[in-house]
Image (tube, rainbow, N blue to C red):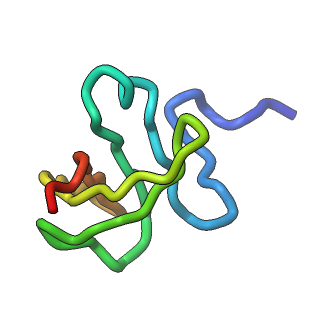
Amino acid sequence: MPGPPRSLRALSASGYEIFDEDFGATGEVVIWSRSPLTPRLGERFNIETRGAPHDLAVGEIRTFSGGWTATCRRAVN
């Protein structure tokens, strides 16, 4: 039986994926989800990456059919 097409992505058990490959250089992560609960600009997330917790704020939101992505940046207190 063939596997799913490469264009389909499996979500983690939490229903979210966090992309942090460029966090060290940019201080940004992208959260991707199919959740119906879309975050709002300025909303904050505590995310552990690179072995440490970070306080991040939503700076950009993009919606698409069936989901959304949120670009989050280091929060300024």
**Which residue is at 25% across, 47% downward?**
74
Task: Determine the residue located farthest toward the right in the rendered image.
Answer: 1
Q: Can residue 71 be seen in this view?
A: no
Percent of width and height locating residue 42: 14, 67
**Which residue is at 35% across, 63% downward?**
66
For this rendering, which residue is in front, 13 or 27?
A: 27
- Against 46, residue 5 (above or below) is above
Q: Is residue 54 visible?
A: yes
For this rendering, which residue is in front, 27 or 61?
A: 27
Percent of width and height locating residue 32: 40, 52
For this rendering, which residue is in front, 17 or 23?
A: 23
Task: Determine the residue located farthest toward the front in the rendered image.
Answer: 77
Quarter in which the C terminus is drawn? bottom left
Percent of width and height locating residue 53: 49, 53
- Among the 4 quarters of the image, the one containing residue 6: top right
Percent of width and height locating residue 73: 23, 46
**Which residue is at 28% across, 72% downward?**
38
The mark total stands at: 0
Quarter in which the N terminus is drawn? top right
**Which residue is at 35% across, 41% downward?**
29
